Image (tube, helix red, strand yellow):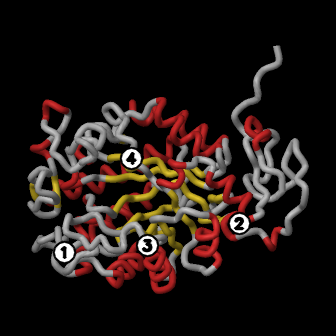
Amino acid sequence: MVPPLPVGPIPASNPGRLGPNPGAAPSKTLDPNAQPALFTPLTLRNVTFKNRIVVSPMCQYSAVDGVPNAWHIQHLGQLASRGAGAVIVEATAVQRNGRISPNDLGLWNDEQEKAFLPIVEFLKSQGAVAAIQLAHAGRKASVYSPFIKSGEHNALAPEEDGGWPSDIVAPSPLKGWPISGNPREMSGSDIAELIQAFADSATRADRIGFDVIELHAAHGYLLHSFFSPLSNHRTDTYGGSLANRARLIVQVSSAVRKVWPSSKPLFVRVSATDFAAGGITIEDTVYLAQKLGEVGVDLIDCSSGGLVPNQDVSQLGQPGYNVPFAARVRADAAIATGAVGQITDAAQAEKILAEGKADLVLLARALLRNPSWPLDAAAALGAEVEWPWQYRRGRPRM
C-alpha cells in the first residue's frame, strides 16, 4: 500500500514565498523585489516569519484543567495550513488562578506541557512560526466562558462551577466589572511568585518547541492593570509614578528573557490606551515600549482598551483603529510593532506594512470567518505562495 502524504510540505522549499511551487509550475514568476510587503519574510533574532500575517491569540474556552485537546489542534492547525506566517496560541495562564475562565488554557504543569507538543509539531510542519501568549487574568479571572452566560464572560463563576472567587488577585482591591469578583491586593510575595511563574512557563514553552512568546499586558488583565492608574492605586514601588506602574511588566519581561533562548523573539501585547479619562495614554505606552526594548523585548503588539466598562467605544470597530498606536510606538520607541484590530482585507493590510506603520499584522475574527484569508490575500495581491499539497487543486490560477 502506498502511504498517504505526510502533513508537512513536500518537498521542503522556501516556505510560503515565491514560486515555482513544487508540483505545479506557476503561470508567471514574480520578481522578489516586487513582492507585496505582506508576503515578504521578516527575521527577528534567529526566527524567520515567511510572511507578515499573524494569527492573533483568540480564547477558545475549550480546555479542561488548562489542558489543550483536539479542538485546539484543529483550530490552530487549520490556520497554519492555510498560510499564516505565525500562529499565536490563545492566552495561556501561568498560574491556576490566572485563567480567565475555568475553560482556559494553562502552562503550569507537566500534563499541560505534554499536550502542547503535537500542536507545536503540526504548526511547524506547515511552515508557521509557533507562538504562545502567556498571561494572568488578574481581576478579570474566575468568570464564566461566553458559551455559558449568554455571551457575557464577566459574570463571576463560583467554586461549584469550577471558579476560584476567593483567589482573585489585582494590584489594588478594585473590581473590574460590577458582576465580576472582588480581588485582593497582591502582596510582595504574591508578586515574586507571579514573576517566577511567568519564567517557569517560559521554560516549559521552550521545551515544547515554541518559537515566540508573547506576554499579555493588555485588555485589563493583570499586567495591564498594574500599568494603568485607573486600576493601580498602590503606594509602594509598584504604584504611583509611571516608572513604578511599569515596573511589573518590565520585571516579568526581564525574567522571561533570562530563561528564553537569546535566539528566540519575545513579544509583549499592550493596550496602548485605556480609552478612558485618567488612564493610559499613548505617551505612557511609548515610555513602556522603550523600557521593554531595553530588557530584550523584540516587538510590541499594539491593541487597546479592555480595562474598564466605561471606556470610550467610539473608535472600537473602526477599520484598523489600533494602527496609529502601532505606528507611533514604532517611530518613537524605535522597536518593531504589530498592528491588530479590524484588519480585514488584503489591500488594507498591505498598506499598513508598505507605509511602515507596523512590521506585522495580526488578524483574529477575519480568520475565524475565513481560515484561508492568507491564501486569498496572496491571490488578491498577486503573490505566489505555497499551498498545502492536499489542497492544491483548489488553488486559483494566476
Left or right of 50 in this view: 54 = left
Residue type of the residue flagged with mark 3: Asn
Kindly report which numbered mark, 2 or 3, lies closer to the viewer in this rendering: 3
Say which residue label 1 marks.
229
Kindly report which numbered mark, 3 or 1, lies closer to the viewer in this rendering: 3
Q: Distance between the residues labelled 3 and 1?
A: 21 Å
Earlier in the chain: of badge 1 and badge 2, it is 2
Residue 168 on image: x %, y %: 15, 49
Q: Distance between the residues labelled 3 and 4?
A: 20 Å
Left or right of 256 in this view: 156 = left
Q: Is residue 201 shown to the viewer in this render?
A: no
Query: Within 10 angstroms of label 3, few (less than 14), some, or many (20 or more) residues?
Result: many
Earlier in the chain: of badge 3 and badge 4, it is 4
300 vs 195, nearest the viewer: 300
Say whether marks 3 and 4 touch (CB < 8 Å): no
Earlier in the chain: of badge 2 and badge 4, it is 2
The residue depicted at 56 percent of the width and 57 percent of the height is: 54
The residue depicted at 36 percent of the width and 78 percent of the height is: 285
Query: Within 10 angstroms of label 4, few (less than 14), some, or many (20 or more) residues?
Result: some
Say which residue label 3 marks.
322
Label 4 SS: loop
Kindly report which numbered mark, 4 or 1, lies closer to the viewer in this rendering: 4
Earlier in the chain: of badge 3 and badge 1, it is 1
Residue type of the residue flagged with mark 2: Thr
Can you say whether 244 is above or below 56 in the image? below
Residue type of the residue flagged with mark 1: Pro
Can you say whether 221 is above or below 181 in the image? below
The residue depicted at 35 percent of the width and 40 percent of the height is: 61
Query: Within 10 angstroms of label 1, few (less than 14), some, or many (20 or more) residues?
Result: some
Earlier in the chain: of badge 2 and badge 3, it is 2
293 vs 86, nearest the viewer: 86
Q: Distance between the residues labelled 4 and 1?
A: 27 Å
